[in-house]
Amino acid sequence: MTKNIFIVSGEASGDLHGASLMRALQRLMPGIKAAGMGGPRMREAGLTGLDSKEVSVVGITEVVAKLPQLLRAFRELKKLLMNGRFDAVILIDFPDFNLRFARAAKKTGVPIIYYISPQVWAWRRGRVRKIAALVDKMLVVFPFEEDIYRQAGVDVEYVGHPLYAAAVCPLTKGEARAKLGLAGEETVIALLPGSRTAEIRRLLPLMLEAAPLIEKRLGRKTAFILPAADSAEDALLDDILKASPVPVKVLKKETYTALRASDAAVTASGTATLETALIGTPMVIVYKISPLTYAIARMLISIKDMGLPNIVAGRRVVRELVQDTVTPVNIAGEIADILTDSTKKNGIIKDYGEIRGKLAASGPGIAVDRAAAAVFKVINRHGTDKRQR
């Protein structure tokens, strides 16, 4: 009998992980169908339902502007769930929306699986109790998350991070540059301003202002490339790049090749920082949100570092520029320091190896296959329980 899953993702990183999980489930359960909400990758993998583009948002105050879209999506998803027959609900990250949706989904009796845990270790740790009451299976991607949930009585499984196997580039730096049409002898800097409109508007202009300062500090010809997220609007990028003091080559669907081709990167805080670390490109992490959101967040956040590579390593591996310290001068200074101080650069690359080791889980298979196997078990157990009733 064909299985049906209801899957909800609200951001570009969740779309990436959701699509990989859907394909892994299709290998385990041929013919499985998926409905819910996701982005272009999940739709390519066969998802029907809502487009997550309209609800992707970061920050507390930024949510207000998107509230009508978020409420509309919530109502439509709830109706879609109630009108269908599903074997599992899979929620991917996007915690403020998904935990509320889990409360509605719980009433259906369908098992709820959460993949890519809310970052309870960073802020609002009290959410663990809510999660324990709502979620039937938690699949975590960082090793330190497992104990947090287990102590709260959550059925949790550490599957490893999906980027461990996904964020790879088989090309050498020279091959990557040749593929992208870059000269082999010039310095190449990647600019990754994020996937959401608000963060692109905040960060990309500062990165562009830093570009000529980087070239001046290095004293040599420098190429700048922008491996854009799939969700980044071409019109938005074009509008901002028109004012760029230096040429910037925009690349789509070439993120890992672009990172392999680069000597260093300026990377917005988020999943892209892990991808940059796993490829092995030294970087500076930048993070900037609205002043009010930042003021509120500082009262709630319980960790020192914002960047995922630093969090995974348990110490400061790469520099973070946060809020008012995200300036063209600071960005240029850090990139120049990395590229002129071989000890610093080599130390970052060495620490990246430790991070990579921490993101791998023991056991056979890659993370997404382990996650799919866990979903498969939950679906089968639920089917057995229904037959016994």
Image (cartoon, grey):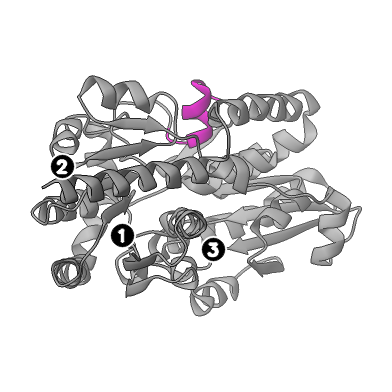
Q: Position of residue 345 (x, y in %)?
A: 73, 30
Q: Residue at x 33, y 64 (%)?
A: 1
Residue 83 in the magenta stretch? The answer is no
Q: Is residue 319 above or below residue 296?
A: above
Residue 313 in the magenta stretch? The answer is yes
- Give the residues drawn in magenta, as a range: 306-316
Q: Counting other residues with Cα less than 10 Å from the Cα at mark 2, is it few (<14), some (14-19), or many (20 or more)?
A: many
Q: Could you tell me the amino acid type at mark 2?
A: Leu
Instruction: Kindly give the residue lying farthest to the left in the view shown.
Output: 107
Is mark 3 in CB contact (under 8 Å) with mark 2? no
Residue that badge 3 annotates: 229
Q: Is residue 93 above or below residue 45?
A: above
Is mark 3 in CB contact (under 8 Å) with mark 1? no
| Pick the front one: 165 or 244 | 165
Residue that badge 1 annotates: 8
Residue that badge 2 annotates: 134
Question: What distance separates the C-alpha of mark 3 from that of mark 1?
Answer: 19 Å
Q: Position of residue 41 (x, y in %)?
A: 49, 67
Q: Counting other residues with Cα less than 10 Å from the Cα at mark 3, is it few (<14), some (14-19), or many (20 or more)?
A: many
| Pick the front one: 157 or 334 | 157
Q: Is residue 6 visible?
A: yes
